[in-house]
Image: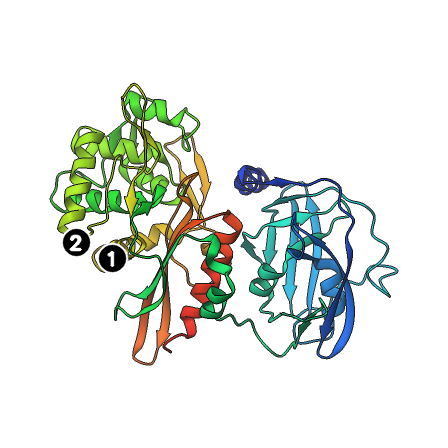
Amino acid sequence: MKKAFSAFLAVLLLVPLLAAPTRAFAEIQPYAQTLIIDGAPAEVRALDGSYERNTFLSLTDLAAVLSGTQKQFRFERVVSTADGEVFTVLRGQTAVMPSGAEGRPKQSPVVSMNLSRNRLQIDGGERKYYSFNAQDGDLYVSVTDLQLMLDLNLKREADGSFSLNTWEGFHADPFGLEQAGFFDGVGSIYLADIDTGEVLFQRNAQAAVPCASLSKLLSYVILKEAARERELNENGTVRISENAQMLSRSGDGIVPLTAGTDVPFQELLEAMLIASSNESALALAEYTCGSEAAFVERMNRRAQELGLASVTMFNCNGLPSFTGDAIPVKRQNLMSAEDLFRLSRHILKNYPEITQITSRQLAHMPHLNDYWTANSNPLVYNLEGVNGLKTGHTNRAGYCVAASMPVGREDGLHTVVLILMGAETAELRGQAAEILLRYAKTAGA
């Protein structure tokens, strides 16, 4: 039974990886990239991901050249019947030196690879970074993600080499990155302390922009307020409608729902927040107000009462919707990054129990055909302390995230919230968000 569950869990963990966006590449010939490590030159295999100087380095080679330094790590590919293919990194351990490893990089064959979220564990914990899985069992990881993963501080030199001092940890200045154009691929950013109101970083934060599934945070407020007023029973069940079933079976469906069945309220709530289930949000909206239209009217009214002037909601889940005109107009829920921060602060102050859900990496819905899901927020895996809150994506909204994290300050523990909207890719969303949250740990300390 235990072995069967392990096999099932492995399949479950692979589902979001296989379903994650992938970018296909033709066959690629890796090249030799020079690293200056504590003043000494070394070479590792590298490749450019679709654009020149979008550099990805071989983890096998990096482990070899960092062996014996303060940043040494062991990298291995493990294949088992229970877990499938898993790549492991153990920091502080000596690298496994393959036969003929002297004089790396060795002559590299032409390989075919896809950029995807391969299963990667660092010191035993699951991580959600994009990488190239090479045919020879190696992983190629971008220099940005390598710095975040391994606490490195790489610098690009004028001759094209990278230098690092292994006694230094990762450091990034978001204001310098802003000046260099790093955030040009992101629409809006608002990073602030919910306890003091101090703004640590912002960019285009007042503009009302499509907010995709971050809309579900406002739905959460309506649901919690209705429970507080005893309009619904959080420990009860929800009857699934034909509309919710239809949405679950569409291209925007996440969790399978069957009309006429009764599902625990809490399971639908967890599916809405962790898996970003659109059909669960619809089922909860209908349960609360009788119809989605009535629920959305309540969302808009409550947003105004909370002082969220940028909010315009057309539905409860953030999916695009169309008018019924002869030439339909495509509409999307709108909210500014600053108002999303205010909404997140309201939730964390009044309903802090949300993080008991949003901090979980996995969720199990036994009444939904024994459904398992992984958290859609990669920061919950990649950065210690992140405990929420929500991700979102549509073509027009781009990739969005609302993230919360406790940080230590001289006067005690504070909570920072990052709102990042309109990222061009899921990779950029994860990288920019992690850089900003790492900065928040030290800013104002």
Does residue 41 lie above or below 204 as drawn?
below
Circles 1 and 2 in contact, beta carbons < 8 Å: yes
Calculate the distance from the C-alpha at mark 1 to the C-alpha at mark 2: 9 Å
Q: Is residue 126 left or right of residue 307?
A: right
**Name of the residue lying farthest toward the left:** 229
Quarter-wise, where is residue 71 in the image? bottom right
**Name of the residue lying farthest toward the right:** 100
| SS at circle 1 | helix
Q: Position of residue 294 (x, y in %)?
A: 16, 32
Neighbourhood count class around disc 2 (C-alpha, 10 Å): few under 14, some 14–19, many 20 upward: few
Q: Can residue 123 be seen in this view?
A: no
Q: Which residue is drawn at 86% across and 59% down?
A: 99
Q: Can residue 37 be seen in this view?
A: yes
Does residue 127 lie above or below 325 as drawn?
below
Neighbourhood count class around disc 1 (C-alpha, 10 Å): few under 14, some 14–19, many 20 upward: some
Colour option used: rainbow
Q: Position of residue 432 (x, y in %)?
A: 48, 58
Type of amino acid at the residue the image marks with label 2: Gly
Type of amino acid at the residue the image marks with label 1: Arg
- Return the mark for residue 21: none
N-term-proximal mark, 1 vs 2: 2
**Residue occupied by mark 1:** 342
Q: Where is residue 157 in the image (x, y as percent from the top left)?
A: 67, 71
- Quarter placement of the C terminus: bottom left
- Return the mark for residue 307: 2
Q: Which of 35 and 96 is in front in this view?
A: 35
| SS at circle 2 | loop
Does residue 71 lie above or below 277 as drawn?
below
Q: Residue at x 68, y 71 (%)?
A: 158
Q: Residue at x 48, y 66 (%)?
A: 179
- Quarter placement of the N terminus: top right
Quarter-wise, where is residue 42 in the image? bottom right
